[in-house]
Image (spheres, grey):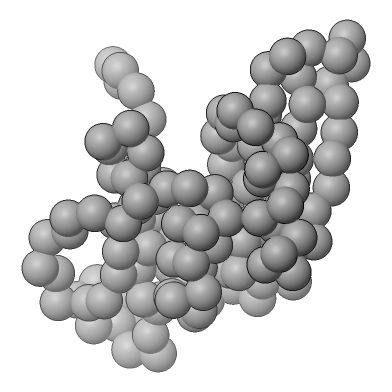
């Protein structure tokens, strides 16, 4: 029986720009990470490393298997998106605009939740929900 979601892991062709997106645009913080044989980042939210970024490479490396990097334009296969709760949509929109990120907004029917959708540099769709 599961208790909670621990983290999501993203294989990154653009490791630094993906790290910058989650830290500078969304406000996650870079934190402690074990000394794995491959490069990456653990990004924290509320003291928990919720997003793990792993540098994708042409060789299997420490994973002992081939890593296929999906084309960002084609999305993430059956995995549709990851969602976060936000607290200030105006601040997020300003950060995304400053970073040159394309995003879309939606109001959930009934008007209780405002949403922002933005793809990260790897093509993973990120949803941020703002409860009214």
Residue 69 place in picture, x, y as percent? 52, 76
In the foreground, 83 or 131: 131
In the rendered image, the quadrant that contains the N terminus is top left
Residue 67 place in picture, x, y as percent? 41, 76
Establish if 76 lies above or below 122: above
In the rendered image, the quadrant that contains the C terminus is top right
Residue 79 place in picture, x, y as percent? 60, 47
- What residue is drawn where x is 36% and y is 76%? 55
- What residue is drawn where x is 29% and y is 82%? 60
In the foreground, 24 or 64: 24
- What residue is drawn where x is 59% and y is 28%? 87
Residue 57 place in picture, x, y as percent? 38, 85
Establish if 65 lies above or below 118: below
Residue 75 visible from this viewpoint: no
Total label count? 0
Q: Is residue 20 left or right of residue 77?
A: left
| Residue farthest along the left direction in this orientation | 35
Q: Is residue 13 left or right of residue 2?
A: right
Q: Is residue 85 left or right of residue 68?
A: right
Establish if 68 lies above or below 27: below
- What residue is drawn where x is 74% and y is 48%? 93
Q: Quadrant of residue 7?
A: top left
Establish if 118 lies above or below 61: above
Residue 86 visible from this viewpoint: yes
Q: Quadrant of residue 86?
A: top right
């Amino acid at each position: 029986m599961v208790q909670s979601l621990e983290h999501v892991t993203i294989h990154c062709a653009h490791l630094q720009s993906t790290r910058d997106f989650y830290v500078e645009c969304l406000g996650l913080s870079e934190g402690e990470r074990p000394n794995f044989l491959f490069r990456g980042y653990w990004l924290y939210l509320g003291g928990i490393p919720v997003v793990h970024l792993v540098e994708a490479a042409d060789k299997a490396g420490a994973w002992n298997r081939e890593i296929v990097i999906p084309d960002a334009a084609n999305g993430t296969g059956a995995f549709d998106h990851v969602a976060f709760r936000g607290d200030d949509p105006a601040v997020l929109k300003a950060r995304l605009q400053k970073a040159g990120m394309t995003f879309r907004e939606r109001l959930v029917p009934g008007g209780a939740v405002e949403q922002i959708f933005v793809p990260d540099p790897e093509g993973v769709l990120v949803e941020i929900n703002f409860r009214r």
